[in-house]
Image (spheres, rainbow, N blue to C red):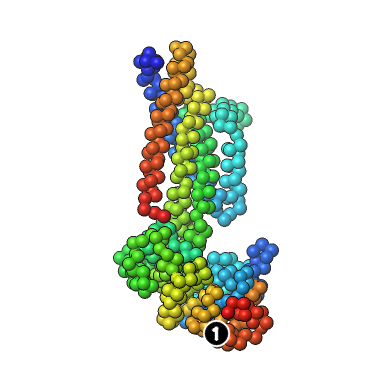
Amino acid sequence: MADSNPNIKIHVSHLKKNFGKLEVLKDISLDITEGEVVVIIGPSGSGKSTFLRCMNQLEEVTDGEITVDGNLITDPKVDINKVRERVGMVFQHFNLFNNMNVLRNLMLAPVDLKKADKAQAEKNAMEMLRKVGMEDKAQAYPAQLSGGQKQRVAIARALCMNPDIMLFDEPTSALDPEMVGEVLQVMKQLAADGMTMVIVTHEIGFAREVADRVIFMDGGYIVEQGPPLELINNPKEARTIDFLNKVL
Amino acid sequence: MLRILNSYGALLLRAMGQTLLLALSGLFFACILGMIFGILSVLKNKACNIIAQIFVDVIRGVPMIVLAYFIYFGLPYGLNTLAGMNVTLSALQAGTICLALNCGAYMAEIIRAGIQSVDIGQMEAARSLGLPYWRAMQRVVLPQAIRTMIPSIINQFIITLKDTSILSVIGFPELVNTAKNVVANTFMSFQTWIIVGIMYLIIITILSRLAKMLERRLNRGRF
């Protein structure tokens, strides 16, 4: 078990995930410590997003164990909703609730799950919007926002639950190039604040700048991992070298 | 034409009231059935999906007139001879059941399609914040689904209102049945059916205008 080391936030051991006959994750083991920023890179279809989605059980795992904050989330008896309250997630396609304005997007979960009363939740939501520079759009509907603005709101929405861990699933892949920067800026700030973050991305430059550790995945395995400069500048494995040559 | 309106106008108006009563009670239970079976068909549970599918397939696969005869005549007779139970249904009860089943099956399909038209990411985002499935459904998915369902639901309401005429075969005194009696008494078939047609046209036009207003109001200021 992971709780031998209290600093370990996420412990993954021999994780396997199949979609029908397709083996997407073959045997993944990994520990992520508190405050660590882990960036996962790799070609599409390598299982990075699936792996990330296993960490809050948006995908049910086929085999293996995942412990988050000391909770064995792969155990069906564990109340996954309680764990998810502490694990924020940001999606490639933002997934803001289209039927609510920005403020209500942020207040829904805290109020519904009785984490805060309305006034408190609103105050907290406005604070989070300020943090991502979106306080003037509190009354706007998602359809009125640009991609970069939507993603910053999505990050603020996750932060409103006061999470210990943030998962990012290709947060800039659906953005116009000129909007990538504003989202990465917010993420950089979060990292500087000491948030534990797991980020699936194609932004190698961002990985180099912000990550504590970079993981390269391919074919359902972790091929190689290490500090960003080491992995990006001096990859050891042939597949890593091949991938980095193509994307850099 | 005026002669018919003079002597039978009140009768026809009362019959229209009966048509509306039957349609509304049928629609009320159809909405409940549609909601239940529509949600059963989107749950991540094979047994629930199959139950919903069977309901929809059976009801859609049988003409409503057959269903009406079966419920009004067949069912009480069968229960009596096979189980010794004495059940009699009034024409209104049988008609309501018949409309509720028939319209309910189509409503279930409309509701299923509406829920499935909402991007799966909406549900995932709500769940990732810790909301339980039903809360996420209630707060995020259904409000968006309903908006896409409304035109189809209105359409189905109108079809059901017109389908009440089929229930003239079980002797319910709705508009068509009453009109038949008027024709039998007066032999003025041309005038009577024109009057009846116009009466349907008026109710349905009013209803669809109201529905359009409702639709516009729900869509105001959103995406």
Q: Is residue A210 above or below residue A71?
A: below
Query: Is any atom of residue A203 visible in this view?
Result: yes
Q: Is residue A206 above or below residue A157?
A: below
Farthest residue in the front direction? A178
Task: Measuring from the top left, give residue A173's x and y in whole percent.
Answer: 52, 69
The residue lying toward the viewer, choosing from A172 and A103, is A172
Farthest residue in the left direction? A119
Q: Is residue A56 above or below residue A38?
A: above
* Left or right relative to B7: residue A184: right
Q: Is residue A201 above or below residue B67?
A: below
Number of disc labels: 1
- Give the residue displayed 41% in from the left and 81% down from the top: A193
Task: Measuring from the top left, give residue A225's x and y in whole percent.
Answer: 60, 83
* Left or right relative to B27: residue A243: right
Q: Secondary structure at mark 1?
A: helix
Task: Measuring from the top left, give residue A171's x and y in whole percent.
Answer: 49, 70
Which image quarter is the C terminus of chain B in? bottom left
The residue lying toward the viewer, choosing from A147 and B23, is A147
> Circle 1 is placed at which residue position?
A228
Picture quadrant of residue B72: top right
The residue lying toward the viewer, choosing from B35 and A97, is A97
Picture quadrant of residue A188: bottom left
Q: Amino acid under label 1?
A: Pro
User: Mark 1 falls within which chain?
Assistant: A
Query: Is any atom of residue A105 visible in this view?
Result: no
Which image quarter is the N terminus of chain B in? top left
* Left or right relative to B5: residue A220: right
- Give the residue displayed 37% in from the left and 42% down from the top: B213
The residue lying toward the viewer, choosing from B147 and B67, is B147
- Give the residue displayed 55% in from the left and 84% down from the top: A228
Farthest residue in the right direction? A21
Task: Measuring from the top left, give residue A24's x and y in whole percent.
Answer: 64, 69
